Amino acid sequence: MFEEEKKKLEQRKKSIDKMEVSKEKLHFAVQSGFAKAKKEQALKRVKIIKRSSWSIVIAAILLISFITTISVSPVFANKVASIPGMDRVLSLIQQDKGLTAAVENDYYQPINKSLEKNGITVTLDGVLADNNGLVVFYSVQSKEIDISKLELKYIQLWSGLHTTNYSFDLGSHSIPLAPEENTDIYSTSEHLWKVKQGKDLSWVVGLKNGDKTEHFRIPFSYKKMDVESKNFIVNKEVKIEGQSLKVKEVIVDPIRAVVKIEENPKNTKKLLARPFDELELVDEKGRKWSAIPGNAYKPLEEGNVWEVPLKESFYFYEPKKLTLTFGKIAAMDKEEAYILIDTESKKFIQQPSQSIFSNLQVKDNRVSFTVNIDKDYDMNMVGFIKFTDADEKEFYIHYEGRTPLYSNYVKGSKTNSPGEGRIEFELPNKSVTTFTNPIRLDLDFYPSWIEEDAEIKVK
């Protein structure tokens, strides 16, 4: 009888090996598989008492039943079933084909380190890593506290006694940890682009519980994956409303993909913050890889070159064709991309011709003015990070909820109400330092765009 069951088992394995993997349906299938596997395992514990050769057959059949239910490759199913906490990780990457493929190709490294304080347990579940950075997965549990009552204060990655280039700090504010009430467990992932492997790494999280903040510091290490990037050299220029842009290359790693775009310094328009939020790569099947909103940046060492990270990587896919489209690009005329204020006469000397600023006030060593809000934008799309006086001294503005990055800063705030908002900031204390009028505020965020049907063949 054992031999007969063994033959049936081998036949089922062969049939499973031929199955196609549907990554778009992966999450639903895996979760269903987990549910069924748990029920089957519970049933097995009740019915199977003696350890015997027959129990090995039963266990193998259960595994095959689990694999068949989720309709994925046996190799992937085995990985999923063997990694603690993997069901939480899968729920986070269900919409990311790139990260799902990275898990399937052995780039996920389980950590499973926990720290408990006053009834709250934080677990560093694991990381997805390649040679350029990593994605951290963590979860929060509590048997004593409703998770939805907790608030997130900060998340940091430390190397020894110093923070790395990744730090998320809400300063004097905090945000709800979980959006739903009666949540038993909260899981999330943090994308840590450009994090190089360091020594004595620690994942640090601050959670506010009522009036008290609990601090969790979990040391960990991971293996840096030795893998080559896939580079698509493009070097093609495109003009959008007269502005010249050069797509230099697309760099694809297992957990991220980046488009490099160079702006021509002779352009008449300034690219604002978040310029390429609508950028997309499209393949021959219509699959799209979109920019991560608000994440485009210019590395200091590359001058006018922007790096635009995409939401997903296609490292484990082989598109036959790739076309880059731009959508709306945040930009405005360079000669209008600033505000000039005389704090003594309390007047705007210069502002954009289609200005949305009014009602300037200078009182008690503070400057404030009104921002007219439209249905197409809010206060997050209006602003600046510093002002410069007539002697070119710079003063950075520390808005509430953000940690000051420089010593020469003043405090500022933004308020929002229907139809209008208000920006306010301090002037330097004259007993500490002086400034010379007028002061210039270079606009980093402003509701101004350029748009034109334009695309570039990448592959």
Image: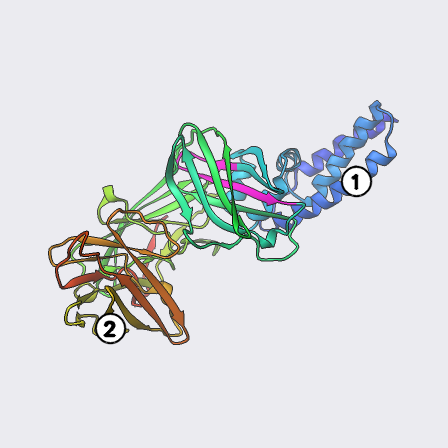
Residue 426: which quarter of the image? Answer: bottom left
On screen, residue 9 above or below 272: above
Q: Which image quarter holds the N terminus?
A: top right
From the viewer's side, name the closer residue of 45 and 141. Answer: 141
From the viewer's side, name the closer residue of 304 and 141. Answer: 141
In the displayed structure image, the side of residue 35 where residue 447 appears, left or right: left
On screen, residue 285 above or below 143: below
Which residue is located at x 23 percent, y 60 percent?
427
Q: Which mark is residue 307?
A: none
Q: Let me know if residue 393 is in the magenta part.
A: no
Which residue is located at x 75 percent, y 44 percent?
36
Q: Earlier in the sequence, mark 2 or mark 1?
A: 1
Q: Which mark is residue 360?
A: 2
Q: Residue furthest left?
A: 391
Q: Which residues are magenta?
A: 127-142
Q: Let me know if residue 129 is in the magenta part.
A: yes
In the displayed structure image, the side of residue 295 where residue 344 appears, left or right: left
Q: Main secondary structure of the magenta part?
A: strand
Whole-angstrom CA distance, mark 2 to mark 1, is 69 Å
Element type at mark 2: strand
From the viewer's side, name the closer residue of 315 and 144. Answer: 144
* Residue 208 horizontal/vertical position (percent): 52, 49
* Residue 141 horizontal/vertical position (percent): 62, 44
In the displayed structure image, the side of residue 344 where residue 86 appears, left or right: right
In the displayed structure image, the side of residue 195 where residue 345 appears, left or right: left
The answer to whether any part of residue 200 appears in the image is yes
How many neighbours does mark 2 have within 10 angstroms: few (below 14), some (14-19), or many (20 or more)? some
Q: Amino acid at mark 2?
A: Leu
